[in-house]
Amino acid sequence: MSTVDFLNLLVSALLLAGVYAAMSVGMTVIYGVMKIVNLAHAGFLMLGAYFVYELYTRFHVDPLLGVLLAFPVFYCIGVALYWLMVRRLPRSDTPTLSSLLLLFGLWLVIQNLGYLVWGNADRSILTSRTFATIQIGPIIFPTVRLVVFGAAVVSLGALEFVLHKTWFGRAVRALMQNTDAGRIVGVNVDRTARVSFGVGIAFAGVAGGLLAMMYSFTPDFGGAFLLRSFVIIVLGGLESFSGVAVGAVILALVETFSILFIPSGYQSAVSFSLLVVALVVMPSGLAGLWNRRQRLT
Amino acid sequence: MEQAATVNVSGVANSRWSSPVVRSAALEIVCVTAVALLPLAKLGHNGVRLAFVTLVWVTASLGWNLIGGFAGQVSFGFAVFYGLGAYTTAIVYSQGGLNRFVAILAGALVAMAASFLIGLPTFRLKGPYFAIATIGVSETTRVVMTNLEITGGASGYRMVERGAFNQLVHFYVALTIAAMAVAVTIWIRHSKLGLALLAIREDQEAASDLGVNPFRCKLLAHAVGAALTGAAGGAFVGYAAFIYPQGVFGFDISVAILLMPIIGGVGTVWGPVVGAVVYGLVNEELFASFPQLHLLLYGSLLIIIILFEPGGVLGMVDRVVRLFRRRSSIASHS
């Protein structure tokens, strides 16, 4: 493999990592605040993809604008679902049987409603950007990936700003560290959980829209990405935002370079093996390793 | 659920063969005898087939319940054990030329071995890791089995039947395995292991403070559950004679296996049995006519049960009985 090939792969892996981070961050927000594993995440990724698709084919809304519109729409869906179902779950500091099963049921419902509405034909969003490339020196950037990467980074930056500079963000981080202590210092747990659930779902919708610009999709679209999101947040230690970024980069690198050695039919096996390795070698994720080192010094 | 646990604790304290065990065992004997006599009732070919499929579901449902119900560890990947059991049984029976029960035992053992691969890395950790890993495991197994040459890959595997096909043989094989599954469940529920599992479900840290080893208990329950589900798959393949990865490793099999105990009453001995019977009959008669809708209906059912009646059918019956008792006691007081 020549240096140019290597650089091309490296760049495409890093561009992919941006979307992967945006895709997984919603799960981290929801898990961190409520200790609920959002299994319905896959369903919302799929809905996000079809949302952008429908806006584009019916009203000729640019997919980027569609992604922007997806945020408030999916936020409202998330808040509504929280009010309808999620708040009725028993509170716990570990994921419960009922929360896992409820969100799993929700995933099944969303996915199969998708089949009812859109059938199982492959759809894709084709714009003038889709096949365009930009060449910088010897490295070729597919335009759509650059755009998607940019959008993902902007949305992650916005989230980072909110988390560190606003009252809501501080409340979220407080609840992630300790729910009871958060309540003592005056955090409204129910309200914060509601908003966090909305934000988590909104990020799923946005990420789904971004992924739809790059890949073709069916109502089963989210399933493969659900497993990837799991791998990323486990690598990141489940509750760490910087961990998500690092986890996304690792998964993207492993996936991209494993294509050289492993047949593409086994792609889901690759991410799963990474999950198992992560669980065995560093159960508390990269953030755990980092914390341990900090504590030692 | 907590009430059930306390009732049982007092039951065990009385004597080794306390009344709940005897009652469950008696109920099992009655049920097994009744089901064994079913073919006499002129059910016809289709009726016996339905009863056979339901017995297979009962076994798998009880297997899931051991780890999902008793220990509270949700698995979304029990189709792995079902499929491995089916494939192993088919291969051992056709190519090894062994007895049917030996082949099914081999299937159960392979499923059990696979359960350790999932359990060893995940059960040591507290948190959602096990549930997450089971989703990955079922995806990965299906992909690998689809690409594997020796099992025929995506085109499937045909089991070679020796002698003439007799439907009743398969029916009684499935009944034997289901009866064993119920017996194992009753035994575990009333043993020290069962109490340890319930304690882990309620509060893992408190349980380990009291001397329970959560890792070992979960691993054991998962292994037994996997073996039962593998045996269910083995019983099924004898009847079906042809299996393919999308069928036995399918996502809908995993969903079905976890749905049945939830319908009947998760974490109880008889809930999974009731759930499997309800599921078996309803699935066959109703959902089969809407193949696109069945996962949608399962999902809705799951949401409704979790939100409104987490105890399932048994929980509902319990609630109704208590309501009537309260009514009658109020009536007698006034």
Image (cartoon, coloured by chain):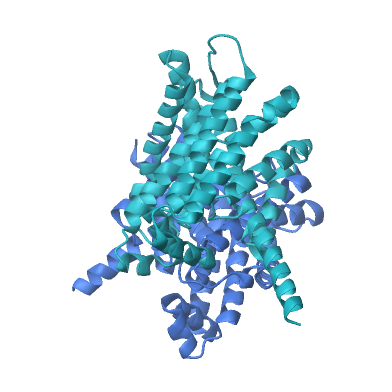
Chain colours: A blue, B cyan
Q: Quadrant of residue B257?
A: top right
Q: Quadrant of residue B47?
A: top right
Between A64 and A169, the residue placed more toward the observer is A169
- A157 to the left or right of B203: right
Quadrant (top left, top right, bottom left, bottom right) of the C terminus of chain A: bottom left
- B139 to the left or right of A258: right
Q: Position of residue B98 (x, y in %)?
A: 42, 16
Between A64 and B251, the residue placed more toward the observer is B251
- B292 to the left or right of A153: right
Between B190 and B98, the residue placed more toward the observer is B190
Q: Position of residue A159 (x, y in %)?
A: 53, 73
Farthest bottom residue? Answer: A185
Farthest top residue? Answer: B163
Q: Is residue B329 above or below residue A69?
A: below
Residue A11 in sight in this render = no
Farthest left residue? Answer: A297
Between A162 and B90, the residue placed more toward the observer is B90
Q: Position of residue A134 (x, y in %)?
A: 53, 49
Residue at 64 percent across and 52 percent down: it is B263
Q: How many marks?
A: 0
Farthest right residue? Answer: A58
Quadrant (top left, top right, bottom left, bottom right) of the N terminus of chain A: top left
Residue at 33 percent across and 61 percent down: it is A286
Q: Is residue B109 above or below residue A117?
A: above
Q: Position of residue B34 (x, y in %)?
A: 64, 35
Residue A96 in sight in this render = yes
Q: Is residue A97 above or below residue B231?
A: below
Q: Quadrant of residue B184?
A: top left
- B101 to the left or right of B270: left
